[in-house]
């Protein structure tokens, strides 16, 4: 086996194992999200779970960021800093979490209703269902040689046809030895599909559906230097998963 082939197999194995590990962490962490629980308690629990699995927190490797998660509530879209805020029933929480495993980052995000989706309004349930299904459809399109624009167009079309807004400033991205890598994967088509890069074997990508009910832009309102909120305060959602592109197919990692 050549050294290049060995490195390829090592990366594939590390990222698939890291994704399975992160899935176990998320499956324990999400039921912990309940009314009265503080954001910082969720973050501490995430750190415990990742450490117990023998892995490392990914996000604390980002310069200036010291938490295991980004926890964004309601109009906060992404990069919410875990603080003492206590969750309330019907809050919409965006949970973004990553692990650094075997030398590679794996990135994942989900959106949940505190108290369960039965506690949410019919419109909120529809809003989240659209984002969840859009991510699943987008992941199914990722294959070696496919243009990234195919995924971008799919995400933008499905979100807009449902009556919602893509957040243009925030995108998916390649992921690997660094958490955020080129190329970026917008949730909308910026140019012709043929002019966008192709998914390459041996690389991994974080596919993200980042959207809002009534706004397509974000602002930094809090003084924490991280949290990004919808400009008009409308509800937001974020669904994300990492995918490894192999020679003939792609593997959803988490």
Image (spheres, rainbow, N blue to C red):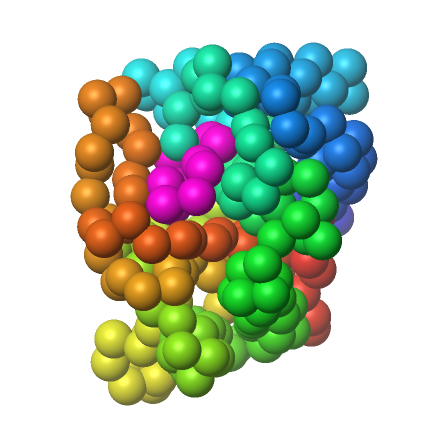
For image coordinates 29% across by 40% down, the residue present is: 228
Q: Is residue 97 above or below residue 6?
A: above
Q: Nearer the viewer, residue 157 or 100?
A: 157
Q: Closest to the observer: 16 or 217?
A: 217
Say how many tags the image has.
0
User: Which quarter of the figure has residue 141?
Assistant: bottom right
Identify the image quadrant of residue 148.
bottom left
Regarding residue 247, the answer to whether it shows in the image is no
Residue sitting at 40 percent across and 78 percent down? 163
Q: Decide whether the magenta segment is chiefly helix, strand or loop.
A: strand
Report x, y in % for residue 76: 36, 41
The image shows residue 88, relative to residue 48, as above or below, that is below
Q: Residue at x 44, y 36 (%)?
A: 72
Q: Where is residue 16 drawn, in percent x and y? A: 73, 45
Which residues lie in the magenta part? 70-79
Position of residue 83 in the picture relative to residue 52 (left or right): left
Residue 170 placement, left or right of 143: left
* Residue 229 visible somewhere in the drawing: yes
Q: Nearer the viewer, residue 189 or 5?
A: 189
Q: Image quarter for residue 108? A: top right
Residue 70 screen position, x and y as percent: 47, 31
**76 falls in the magenta region:** yes
Residue at (57, 48) in percent of width and height:
111
Residue 7 location, x and y as percent?
63, 42
195, above or below 173, in the image: below
């Amino acid at each position: 086996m050549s050294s290049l082939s060995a490195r390829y197999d090592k990366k594939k194995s590390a990222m698939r194992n890291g994704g399975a590990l992160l899935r176990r962490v998320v499956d324990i962490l999400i039921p912990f999200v309940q009314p009265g629980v503080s954001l910082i308690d969720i973050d501490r629990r995430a750190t415990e779970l990742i450490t117990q699995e023998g892995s490392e927190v990914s996000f604390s490797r980002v310069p200036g960021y010291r938490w295991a998660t980004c926890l964004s509530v309601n109009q906060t879209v992404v990069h919410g800093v875990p603080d003492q805020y206590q969750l309330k029933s019907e809050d919409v929480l965006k949970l973004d979490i990553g692990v650094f495993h075997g030398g590679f980052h794996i990135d994942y995000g989900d959106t949940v209703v505190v108290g369960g989706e039965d506690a949410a309004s019919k419109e909120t349930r529809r809003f989240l269902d659209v984002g969840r299904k859009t991510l699943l459809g987008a992941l199914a399109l990722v294959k070696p040689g496919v243009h990234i624009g195919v995924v971008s167009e799919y995400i933008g079309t499905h979100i807009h046809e449902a009556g919602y807004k893509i957040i243009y400033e925030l995108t998916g991205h390649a992921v690997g030895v660094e958490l955020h890598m080129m190329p970026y994967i917008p949730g909308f088509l910026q140019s012709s599909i043929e002019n966008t890069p192709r998914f390459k074997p041996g690389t991994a990508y974080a596919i993200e559906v980042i959207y809002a009910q009534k706004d397509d832009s974000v602002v930094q309102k809090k003084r924490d230097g991280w949290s990004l909120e919808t400009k008009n305060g409308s509800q937001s959602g974020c669904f994300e998963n990492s995918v490894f592109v192999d020679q003939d197919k792609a593997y959803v990692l988490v």
